[in-house]
């Protein structure tokens, strides 16, 4: 009986050891974690998501590391630009662990280390730029900071997914000086715009005067050409018809002049000299002769 009880105890012990070994040897790792396994204090393996097996009583899970993306608390640090302006820069950093064995064995406080690294890089990069460049080239500055941080933290087994400069603040004295400069620049631009408008108005007026002068000159030229043509026609007529054509033209001009005198405002009675009546007579005689 004692032997039976002793045999059962041994069997129970062996069964318990088997169950315990299975319990200790099987590790189920969640999708969001990686487990670092040590054997006698040394790195043995890194377990990924799913079912994993380790050697019971020899191996142990020393570190459970989350691989989810993490955000460091927003940090604010002072920096001096290349034109000696003090600015306060607010930054935000996101990262995730990619190689847990490096993270747990190479750095103690990963969050503090990344925050310190970002602060140093931000100060260094801003120190290379003037204030205007910091404000206008924010995207380029962020890209340089992200690249520099990624290189610095590579040995720690982490990946910096985002490094943002949230704000760049100035002290009150610098802000007031910049506001005064901005107002002066706006006033200068307004004066330049007004001067350019006046200059353009003068140019347009000059163009209009030039165009009017050109049109007037063109009209005079056309009139001169017409008179020259008329003179040529008269000369040709005199050449063909003799003195009668010349007398006809003179008489016609005299008639036109008298007609113009008679058509004036308030002229009801016209006294004509005998020479004028003779001019009318000669003109009608010549005209009748030409028609006949």
Image: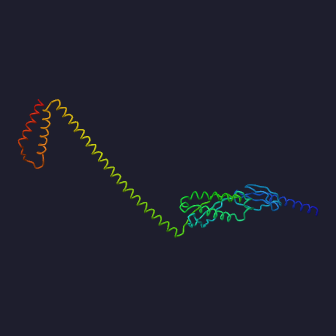
Question: Quarter-wise, where is residue 192 in the image?
Answer: bottom left
The color scheme shown is: rainbow
Q: Quadrant of the C terminus?
A: top left
Q: Is 46 left, or right, of 163 in this rendering?
A: right
Name the residue at 68% across, 64% down: 113
Residue at the limit of the structure toward the left, as seen here: 274
**Number of numbered labels in the structure image:** 0
Q: Is 90 left, or right, of 240 in this rendering?
A: right
Name the residue at 33% across, 51% down: 206
Q: Nearer the viewer, residue 225 or 191?
A: 225
- Spot occupied by residue 6 in the image (x, y as percentages of width and height): 92, 63
Q: Quadrant of the N terminus?
A: bottom right
Question: Quarter-wise, where is residue 4 in the image?
Answer: bottom right
- Spot occupied by residue 97 in the image (x, y as percentages of width and height): 69, 59
Q: Is 112 left, or right, of 210 in this rendering?
A: right
Question: Quarter-wise, where is residue 8 in the image?
Answer: bottom right
Name the residue at 72% across, 63% down: 107
- Spot occupied by residue 183 in the image (x, y as percentages of width and height): 45, 64
Name the residue at 85% across, 60% down: 17
Q: Nearer the viewer, residue 147 or 174?
A: 174
- Spot occupied by residue 96 in the image (x, y as percentages of width and height): 67, 59
Q: Nearer the viewer, residue 35 or 127?
A: 127
Q: Nearer the viewer, residue 205 or 155?
A: 205
């Amino acid at each position: 009986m004692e032997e039976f009880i002793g045999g059962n105890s041994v069997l129970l012990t062996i069964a318990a050891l088997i169950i315990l070994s299975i319990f200790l040897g099987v590790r189920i790792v969640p999708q969001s974690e990686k487990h670092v396994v040590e054997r006698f204090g040394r790195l043995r393996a890194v377990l990924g998501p799913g079912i994993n097996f380790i050697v019971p009583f020899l191996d142990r899970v020393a570190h459970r590391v989350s691989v989810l993306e993490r955000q460091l608390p927003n940090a604010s640090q002072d920096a001096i630009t290349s034109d000696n302006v003090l600015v306060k820069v607010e930054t935000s950093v996101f990262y995730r662990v990619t190689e847990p064995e490096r993270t747990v064995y190479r750095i103690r406080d990963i969050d503090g280390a990344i925050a310190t690294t970002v602060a140093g890089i931000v100060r260094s990069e801003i120190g290379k730029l003037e204030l205007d460049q910091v404000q206008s080239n924010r995207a380029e500055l962020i890209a340089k900071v992200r690249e520099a941080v990624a290189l610095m933290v590579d040995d720690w087994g982490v990946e910096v997914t985002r490094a943002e400069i949230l704000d760049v603040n100035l002290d009150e004295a610098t802000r007031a000086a910049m506001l005064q400069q901005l107002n002066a620049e706006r006033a200068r631009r307004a004066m330049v715009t007004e001067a350019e408008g006046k200059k353009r108005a003068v140019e347009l007026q000059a163009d209009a005067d030039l165009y009017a002068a050109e049109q007037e000159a063109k009209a005079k030229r056309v009139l001169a050409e017409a008179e020259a043509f008329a003179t040529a026609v008269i000369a040709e007529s005199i050449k063909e018809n003799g003195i009668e054509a010349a007398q006809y033209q003179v008489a016609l001009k005299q008639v036109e002049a008298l007609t113009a005198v008679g058509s004036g405002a308030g002229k009801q009675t016209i006294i004509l000299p005998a020479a004028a009546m003779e001019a009318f007579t000669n003109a009608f005689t010549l005209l009748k002769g030409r028609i006949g």
